[in-house]
């Protein structure tokens, strides 16, 4: 007998009433929601039994005889009397249960009271099974406990039992929606509500809230529950489970027919179908698709819904309802829509505070009030593609997970000396949950107040090293930054210093464009301090000017300095968007066109990295329809792609570059008062280099010799008093051209329009220094060698690289030809020792001969104009000719003799 086995397992030498109860629960294997759908489980009863009897006892050996106690014998006598009442000759488990429940002093009754089980409901369920057994004429055989609701128990989950067992989170708020659902359920016809809302707003929670209201016999707002709902059961249908395994034709139809029949016969079941649109086309026979008339699960339940034989609460999103349900008018009219809107931030905060205890118990941490509010505020502001309260709950959950993992080692180390207050806190939390299950709400309120007091005390001890971690606003901010890549942490001293020096750092990298740098720096500081318009991008800027003056380079440097990496820049070359249809490349192809569903180049890049710099290079070359896309980004900070998804640009910096007005700028040269002519400046530098004829000056990266020379010469420049006025007039003329080209609605949405000035020789010299430093750094990182250039060679690079028309781009070409090409030839020969010094100089009297010296012994001379490439040895500043046979060797030797 099962009861005897239970008695041996619990260390008892006789079978008592509690062992009978354990045997009944173990024998009832078909119920999916605990014994007789009451939520009773073996583990739960055993746990309470161990508590009442003083702990777990040693099992009795299997060879020992177990007898029945006097109380059990009296129970069997009472069960016999129950059989006589029902006119049957067989004692069923339900008769034994009724006999157990009739004795108020038995241990089984104390166990049920300790578990908070409603004994009256248990009796009603047992009597219902006995009544069904008698009506079927099965008095001479064992009662089939699952036969009454076999399909319901197998394919549905009882939410009322789940709530009693504590496996469903409490429902906070949503009293209006629950009230609407209750009103629709009370209707005479079409009493099937369908919950419509975006993913994550709490549609399923409302259905679970109805189950909680039935268990608690009160609505969420505290009002009494309507009488027609008090004895109802809320069952959730698993659509995937009822379809799975239906291999034969007609098997699914048989399951659905039995489901409808059992629901109708039960009379107290409200069926919940989450994602109700999945019924359309599920298990279809014949034509498929909404409104096709083919036999699917939706068409199977239509007749029963029309006759009002059972009630359904459906839940789906607005888009899926429009796509599937609305296309089948016959199915749509059988449901009454209930819109579930996204809660406000205030409502979401209340929801999170109501769920905080469960997450604290799971993660073994404490959430501060500020952390809960920050989760709602930051998720609402920065996570635009999801909805409250789901995204805020996920933030709080992951922050607790992070805190739990971080403090795991400390908790293990301090486990033996754990604070007594922490144990008391966890015990109070557990006792409060048990009181709620037993509906002892006054006691639960007292325990909640005590729990709050413990939380305040633990907040101080946890900060000083307790094993209970505290989740505060900083933890929430770190999770948001990990999700979105948007820096949201409170600025520390280091970051404030970084922002304060941003303008000066940018000016060191971008030469001659101080106005553009100042505008960018101001925009970024406003955004980081939270002073910008929250519904617009960080800034929308237009850079205009001739080619090669640094418009694109400024965007690259900014991405590196502020966003941390040049990968944070989304670059779009607008010359690729000259056709009208190319707009679809930005937001995605429309339905029916090639590429639909792949997403747009712009929208997908911003969705993956919301905090970025968007560079639209040479925007004037794009088709005018592209500008219509920009209007929405600049005004509202959002854009809808071809699939209807809204992409937020509120944390992006939009930079447009254009060459409009470049001819006007190039035609206007700077006056001589601002800087010397190119020839005069070059001659002055050459003369200053050759002042000490007995020695040669070398320029080395990361030293102040050449840089201080540049700065001192820049300080000597005399500015024309009228230059600032001329510069303003030139900028105004360029902006007039910009206004004539772009439409007024685009111009009005720009935060700033910055005119880049033409670069002069003074700026070119400083840019040359930056480029040479990059080359020296690459040589050092790749080979370990130290590279030094003579000032004569640097000036030759500047002479060849300066162009008023093309800006600084020819400078890099000159550097490649005079330095990098010669270095590559020497490295390929393999004569340079690791970590040696390399000296490059321009031979006297030449403009194309460059000497490369390493270890002060071997010189490799290269003339790319003539094709000569040979070796020369230096001994006490004497140059000896190298290999013969070169067509330009004689000219080269003349140059060397001239400079010896």
Image: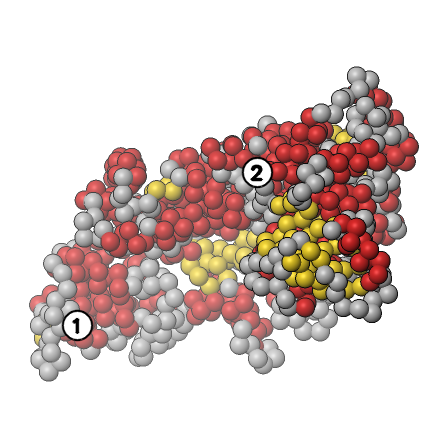
Residue closest to the eye, 544 or 796? 796
Which color scheme does this rendered protein use?
secondary structure
Residue closest to the eye, 665 or 362? 665
Mark 1 neighbour class, 10 Å CA radius: few under 14, some 14 to 19, many 20 or more: some
Q: Residue furthest bottom?
A: 63
* Residue 606, position as x, y percentages in the image: 66, 48
Q: Which residue is mark 1?
A: 9
Mark 1 and mark 2 lie on one chain; the one further toward the N terminus is: 1
Residue 381 circle label = 2
Residue displayed at 64% across by 50% down: 788
Residue closest to the eye, 603 or 325? 603
Residue closest to the eye, 11 or 749? 749
> Up-down: is 140 above or below 691?
below
In screen coordinates, is 894 left or right of 181?
right
* Residue 346, position as x, y percentages in the image: 49, 33
Residue displayed at 80% across by 58% down: 893
In screen coordinates, is 119 left or right of 533?
left
Give me the C-alpha separation between circle 1 and circle 2: 58 Å
């Amino acid at each position: 007998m099962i009861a005897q086995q239970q008695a041996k397992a619990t260390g008892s030498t006789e079978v008592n009433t509690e062992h009978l109860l354990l045997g009944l629960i173990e024998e009832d294997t078909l119920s999916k929601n605990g014994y007789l759908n009451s939520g009773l489980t073996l583990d739960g009863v055993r746990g309470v039994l161990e508590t009442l009897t003083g702990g777990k006892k040693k099992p009795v050996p299997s060879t020992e005889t177990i007898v029945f106690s006097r109380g059990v014998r009296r129970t069997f006598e009472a069960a016999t009397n129950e059989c006589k009442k029902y006119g049957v000759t067989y004692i069923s488990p339900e008769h034994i249960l009724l006999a157990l429940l009739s004795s108020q002093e038995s241990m089984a009754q104390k166990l049920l009271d300790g578990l908070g089980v409603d004994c009256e409901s248990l009796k009603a369920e047992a009597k219902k099974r006995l009544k069904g057994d008698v009506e079927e004429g099965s008095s001479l055989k064992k009662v089939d406990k699952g036969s009454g609701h076999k399909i319901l128990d197998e394919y549905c989950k009882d939410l009322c039992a789940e709530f009693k067992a504590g496996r469903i989170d409490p429902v906070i708020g949503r009293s209006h929606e629950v009230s609407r659902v209750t009103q629709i359920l009370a209707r005479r016809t079409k009493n099937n509500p369908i919950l419509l809302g975006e993913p994550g707003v709490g549609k399923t929670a409302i259905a679970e809230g109805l189950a909680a209201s039935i268990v608690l016999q009160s609505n969420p707002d505290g009002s009494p529950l309507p009488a027609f709902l008090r004895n109802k059961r809320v069952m959730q249908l698993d659509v995937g489970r009822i379809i799975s395994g239906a291999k034969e034709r007609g098997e699914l139809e048989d399951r659905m027919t039995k489901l409808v029949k059992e629901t109708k016969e039960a009379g107290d079941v409200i069926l919940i179908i989450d994602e109700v649109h999945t019924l359309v086309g599920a298990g279809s026979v014949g034509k498929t698709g909404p409104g096709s008339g083919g036999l699917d699960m939706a068409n199977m339940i239509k007749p029963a819904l029309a006759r009002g034989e059972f009630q359904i609460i459906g839940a789906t999103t607005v888009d899926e309802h429009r796509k599937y349900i609305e296309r089948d008018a016959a199915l749509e009219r059988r449901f009454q829509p209930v819109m579930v809107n996204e809660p406000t931030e205030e409502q979401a905060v209340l929801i999170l505070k109501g769920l905080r205890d469960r997450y604290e118990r799971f993660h073994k941490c404490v959430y501060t009030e500020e952390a809960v509010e920050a989760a709602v505020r930051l998720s609402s502001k920065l996570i635009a593609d999801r909805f409250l309260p789901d995204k805020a709950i996920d933030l709080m959950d992951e922050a607790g997970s992070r805190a739990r993992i971080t403090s795991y080692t400390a908790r293990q180390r301090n486990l033996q000396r754990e604070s007594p207050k922490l144990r008391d806190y966890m015990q109070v939390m557990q006792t409060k949950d048990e009181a709620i299950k037993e509906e002892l709400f006054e006691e639960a309120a007292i325990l909640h107040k005590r729990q709050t007091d413990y939380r305040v005390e633990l907040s101080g001890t946890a900060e000083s090293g307790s094993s209970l971690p505290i989740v505060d606003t900083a933890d929430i901010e770190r999770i948001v930054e990990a999700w979105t890549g948007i820096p949201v942490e409170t600025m520390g001293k280091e970051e404030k210093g970084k922002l304060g020096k941003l303008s000066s750092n940018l000016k060191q990298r971008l030469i001659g464009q101080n106005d553009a740098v100042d505008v960018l720096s101001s925009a970024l500081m406003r955004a980081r301090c939270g002073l910008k318009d929250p519904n617009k991008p960080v800034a929308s800027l237009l850079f205009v000017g001739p080619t090669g003056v640094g418009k694109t380079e400024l965007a690259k440097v900014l991405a590196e300095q502020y966003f941390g990496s040049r990968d944070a820049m989304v670059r779009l070359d607008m010359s690729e968007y000259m056709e009208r249809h190319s707009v679809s490349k930005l937001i995605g192809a429309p339905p029916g066109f090639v590429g639909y569903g792949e997403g747009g180049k712009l929208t997908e890049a911003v969705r993956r990295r919301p905090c970025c710099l968007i560079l639209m290079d040479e925007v004037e070359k794009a088709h005018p329809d592209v500008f219509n896309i920009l209007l929405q980004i600049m005004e509202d900070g959002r854009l809808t792609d071809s699939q209807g998804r809204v992409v937020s640009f509120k944390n992006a910096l939009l930079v447009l570059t254009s060459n409009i007005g470049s001819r006007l700028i190039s035609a206007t040269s700077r006056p001589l008062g601002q800087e010397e002519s190119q020839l005069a400046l070059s001659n002055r530098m050459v003369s200053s280099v050759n002042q000490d004829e007995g020695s040669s000056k070398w320029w080395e990266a990361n030293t102040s010799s050449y840089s201080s020379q540049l700065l001192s010469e820049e300080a000597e420049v005399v500015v024309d008093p009228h230059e600032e006025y001329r510069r303003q007039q030139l900028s105004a003329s360029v902006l007039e051209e910009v206004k004539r080209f772009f439409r007024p609605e685009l111009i009005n949405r720009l935060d700033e329009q910055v005119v880049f000035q033409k670069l002069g020789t003074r700026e070119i010299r400083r840019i040359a220094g930056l480029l040479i430093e990059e080359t020296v750094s690459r040589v050092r990182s790749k080979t370990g060698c130290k590279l030094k250039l003579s000032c004569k060679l640097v000036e030759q690079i500047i002479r060849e690289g300066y162009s008023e028309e093309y800006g600084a781009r020819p400078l890099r070409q000159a550097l490649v030809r005079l330095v990098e090409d010669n270095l590559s030839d020497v490295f390929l020969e393999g004569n340079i020792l690791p970590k040696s010094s390399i000296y490059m100089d321009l031979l006297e009297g030449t403009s194309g001969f460059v000497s490369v010296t390493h270890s002060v012994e071997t010189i490799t001379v290269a003339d790319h104009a003539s094709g000569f490439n040979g070796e020369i040895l230096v001994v006490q500043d004497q140059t000896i000719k190298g290999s013969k046979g070169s067509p330009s060797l004689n000219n080269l030797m003349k140059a060397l003799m001239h400079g010896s």
